[in-house]
Amino acid sequence: MVGKTFLNKVISFCKNHEIEVPDMNDYYFPHGRPRRFFKKLQELNNRFDKVNMELLICMASLNPVNSFAAFDKPKILRLPEFYPNEFTKVDVMKLDFQLQMYIIDLRNNVIFQQVKDLSSLSACAF
């Protein structure tokens, strides 16, 4: 509680010398252009709830750039949780094995090493 005592002394000093004490629990908005940035950020935060953010993060694990460097098997295995009507328990168990083989094949195949985005990945697949 030493920190709280010190903070109380600082607040008391500021009040005695008519120095404004900001509310530390309040949001900070810098002046000027950054205010627009924070407004846009808040708008995006309101648009994407926790579930949608989790879905986007899991989907980002499928990014083919740099030989699928972002590949994250546990995140990809979470995707069926978002679509329970599309996957049976057996499908999910198969997916676990298939994903391991899939990433090994992709990283070892020369054709897929040049993949930069999803459209070039789909072009390689056919």
Image (tube, rainbow, N blue to C red):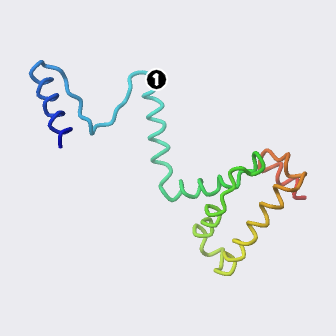
Q: Quadrant of the N terminus?
A: top left
Q: Amino acid at mark 1?
A: Arg
Q: Residue at x 88, y 56 (%)?
A: 109
Q: Is residue 95 above or below residue 36?
A: below
In this view, the residue farthest toward the front is 2
Comparing 82 with 63, the one in front is 63
Residue 60: where, in percent of width, then height? 65, 52
Residue 38: image quadrant is top left
Q: What residue did someone put label 1 on?
A: 33
Please, what secondary structure does the residue beneath circle 1 have?
A: loop
The residue at the far top in this view is: 17
Coordinates of residue 64 in the picture (x, y in percent): 75, 50
Residue name at image x 85 percent, y 52 percent: 112
Q: Position of residue 70 (x, y in %)?
A: 68, 51
Q: Is residue 104 left or right of residue 57?
A: right
Disc 1 crowd rating (10 Å Cα; few below 14, some 14-19, many 20+) is: few
For the C terminus, the image quarter is bottom right
Q: Residue at x 27, y 39 (%)?
A: 25
